[in-house]
Amino acid sequence: MQPDAATQPEYVAALAGIIQKIASSLGEVNPNLLPIKLYVAGGAALHLRTGSRVTADIDAVFSQRVLINDDLQVSYRDADGRARVLYFDRNYNDTLGLMHENAYLDSERVDLPGMDSKILEVRVLSPVDLAVSKLARFSDQDREDIEVLARHRLIDAKSLRERAEQALGGHVGNVKPVRLSINLACKLVEALQR
């Protein structure tokens, strides 16, 4: 997939810059392990899919265990000329929230400028998996992100409920708050798509 036409080119270039730094550190990797996949979630994935909400961090996981450099940030100027910093969030953890077991399998490759996908293949969560990933925490920002996906007609309530319920089956812990979040999110999506 190509980034949404509404994305900020400055942000996409900064994102590509960080990913190029990561790719350059993979030069000594056994060719049989390539390409290593980088699965992008969170606000960066939302921006690539819709052009909305520029985030300061990249939430992502790798398909392999990877040792990466510490200097994974890029300074850039946004469309308004303001100084911004984008960094790779080394603390992002996909095991503490709701994630469907096939989320990475169903992700889509995104083509970023200057990237060699034979070394590092950048993939973005599908819209429904991106929405599902927002349900466990379900903060105001998460609700807004789900609204954006619904307004762009990238998700619908039925698919969101099905995928979230499937994902919930693979998780342990107190699921009552997440079930409430699923219900609230589906009502929100339905209301926006009437």
Image: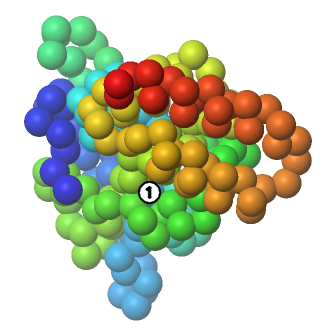
Q: Considering only vertical position in the picture, is 75 above or below 159?
A: above
- Of residues 79 and 126, the one nearer the viewer is 126
Percent coordinates x, y for residue 12 in the rendering: 22, 37
Q: Is residue 87 visible?
A: no
Q: Which residue is mark 1?
A: 39
Nearer to me, 58 or 77? 58
Q: Please, which residue is most extreme toward the bottom here?
A: 32
Q: Quadrant of the N terminus?
A: bottom left
Going by the numbered disc 1, the residue's amino acid type is Tyr
In the figure, is residue 172 to the left or right of 3? Answer: right
Q: Quadrant of the C terminus?
A: top left
Residue at point 57%, 53% (across, down): 162
Looking at the picture, how far across and down is residue 61, in whole percent?
A: 52, 56
Residue 142 lies left or right of residue 12; in this view the side is right
Q: How is the image coloured?
A: rainbow
Instruction: Give above or below for 113 relative to 102.
Output: above
Helix, strand or loop at mark 1:
strand
Total residue callouts: 1
Q: Which residue corresponds to the image point at 47% horizontal and 50% vertical from the top-left?
A: 159
Residue at x-position 16% and y-position 9%:
80
| Front-most of residues 48 and 37 | 48
**In the depicted structure, whether residue 32 falls above or below residue 18:** below
Is 68 left or right of 177, judged from the image as shown? left
Residue 29 x/y as whole percent: 42, 79
- Quadrant of the rendered image containing residue 28: bottom left
| Residue found farthest to the front | 194
What residue appears at the point 20 percent right and 66 percent down from the top-left corner? Answer: 116
Q: Is residue 116 above or below residue 31?
A: above
